[in-house]
Image (cartoon, rainbow, N blue to C red):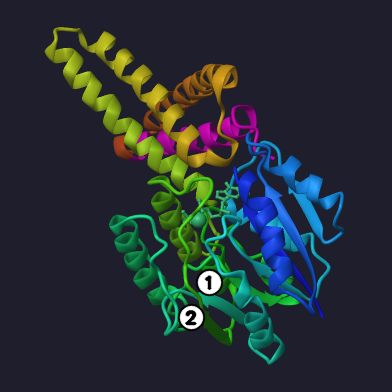
């Protein structure tokens, strides 16, 4: 019986050695390995994991460069495993690793999925950092419960265990964005999974700090939208288009303000367009392409290319709208067609040239 424990980690250097020691103590009699999946943390998490790996064959480390994301880290870790079972646990000691044998037993006894739960009898959520986090967490749980095919008390848990074969089977259907990999898995399954929830007490963090911020809410919404659309439209395209919509609002707002300050229409519209494009670049860099976020000099270079790409997009927009209008199509239809084509152009070209999505 072999078990891979997948640990996504970012800036968790101080937690690596305690984690391995805790697993060693908790998993006697089980043939296990731990896979730390680190997104090139500046604090040297990966070096720490490799130092331990040099002395202990049960420790492995995957260092990902140029990417961020809890869910995608977990997916890569799980797919690197050859064990019969995979477990996922946070790398900050907040999950209770002593529950792993009970979770493994639930799955070897026939369950599809064992979830470490803070919300069944014997579980406890006091480790959440603030009352606001508790409120958000509860609201998210209710929403997830409505969508999940199985009645689960803690669908947002980041602590679970399943057969690797089942993970492999679902892997191609995962959204892989954001931080709710368990919910992603449950929503990806075409059939109802047999789930056992194992209670645990969520511990407060002792070292390092939480990486979850306000943006995770946007990512959670993104996961739900993607699952609703069943992957027919790429999530990035949706975000990109929403950002574009915000850009239009900013453009109009700046135009109005500038005119009130006495600028003529042409100048005011030029200013509005430039401000909107810069804002769009920022928003896309923070949201749409968060996992490939550009920083420093690369961000400036990215902004330049983005302005160029969108400028060409605008020229195409106007050209196409004019041509359609000249062929006696309605003004609204011509305008919408031009805009739609420029959004697709901006999206496709900026994905490859600005953020270089592989
Ligand atoms: N590889 C990877 N791990 C991450 C990322 N963001 C968070 N983590 C890890 O995921 C786990 C849960 O994150 P944490 O910030 O503790 O979330 P919280 O417990 O909800 O506050 C921790 O082990 C983090 O180090 C990421 O972008 N990449
Ligand atoms: Mg945590």
Q: Residue 334 location in percent, x, y?
A: 37, 35
Q: Mark 2 = which residue? A: 149
Predominant SS of the magenta segment: helix
Mark positioned earlier in the residue sequence (2 or 1): 2
Magenta region, residue range: 333-358
Q: Quadrant of residue 338?
A: top left
Judging depth in this view, the residue of 296 and 209 nearest the camera is 209
- Is residue 3 found left or right of 75 in the rendered image? right
User: In the rendered image, which quarter contains the N terminus?
Assistant: bottom right
Instruction: Indicate whether residue 187 is drawn in magenta.
Output: no
Q: Mark 1, residues whose alpha carbon is within 10 Å: few (<14), some, or many (≥20)?
A: many
Q: Is residue 272 visible?
A: yes
Q: Mark 1 = which residue? A: 187
Q: Residue 217 location in percent, x, y?
A: 39, 52
Q: Secondary structure at mark 2?
A: loop
Q: Residue 71 location in percent, x, y?
A: 59, 56
- Is residue 326 found left or right of 268 in the rendered image? right
**C-alpha separation, residue under disc 2 versus residue under disc 1:** 7 Å
- The answer to whether residue 24 is above or below residue 193 is above
Q: Is residue 329 visible?
A: no
- Residue depicted at 42% across the width and 85% down the height: 121
Q: Secondary structure at mark 1?
A: helix
Mark 2 touching mark 1, by CB under 8 A?
yes
- Residue depicted at 67% across the width and 91% down the height: 110
Q: Quadrant of residue 66?
A: top right
Judging depth in this view, the residue of 20 and 76 nearest the camera is 20
Q: Residue 170 location in percent, x, y?
A: 67, 70
Instruction: Indicate whether residue 338 is drawn in magenta.
Output: yes
- Residue depicted at 44% across the width and 78% down the height: 123
Judging depth in this view, the residue of 356 and 155 nearest the camera is 155
């Amino acid at each position: 019986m072999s078990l891979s424990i997948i640990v996504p980690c970012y800036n968790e250097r101080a937690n690596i050695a305690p984690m391995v020691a805790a697993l060693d103590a908790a998993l006697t009699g089980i043939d296990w390995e731990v896979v730390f999946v680190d997104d090139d943390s500046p604090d040297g998490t990966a070096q720490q994991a490799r130092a331990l790996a040099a002395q202990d064959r049960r420790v492995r480390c995957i260092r990902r460069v140029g990417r961020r994301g809890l869910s995608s880290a977990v997916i890569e870790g799980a797919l690197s495993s050859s064990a019969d079972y995979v477990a996922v646990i946070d790398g900050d000691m907040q999950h209770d690793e002593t529950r792993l044998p009970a979770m493994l037993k639930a799955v070897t006894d026939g369950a599809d999925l064992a979830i470490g739960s803070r919300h069944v009898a014997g579980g406890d959520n006091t480790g959440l950092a603030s009352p606001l986090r508790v409120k958000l967490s509860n609201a998210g749980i209710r929403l997830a419960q409505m969508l999940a095919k199985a009645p689960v008390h803690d669908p947002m848990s980041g602590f679970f265990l399943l057969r690797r074969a089942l993970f492999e089977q679902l892997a191609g259907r995962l959204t892989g964005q954001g931080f709710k990999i368990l919910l992603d898995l449950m929503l990806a399954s075409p059939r109802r999974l047999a789930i056992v929830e194992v209670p645990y007490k969520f511990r407060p963090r002792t070292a390092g700090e939480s990486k979850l911020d306000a943006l995770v809410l946007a990512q959670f919404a993104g996961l739900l939208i993607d699952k609703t659309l069943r992957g027919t439209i790429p999530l990035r395209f949706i975000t990109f288009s929403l950002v574009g919509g915000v850009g239009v609002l900013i453009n109009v707002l700046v135009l109005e303000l500038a005119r009130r300050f006495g600028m003529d229409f042409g100048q005011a519209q030029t200013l509005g367009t430039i401000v909107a494009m810069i804002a769009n670049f920022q928003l896309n860099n923070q949201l749409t392409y968060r996992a490939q976020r550009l920083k420093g000099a690369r961000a400036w270079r990215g902004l330049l290319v983005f302005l160029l790409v969108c400028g060409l997009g605008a020229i195409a927009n106007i050209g196409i709208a004019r041509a359609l209008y000249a062929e006696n199509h309605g003004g609204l239809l011509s305008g919408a067609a031009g805009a739609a084509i420029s959004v697709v152009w901006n999206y496709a070209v900026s994905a490859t040239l600005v953020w270089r999505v592989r």
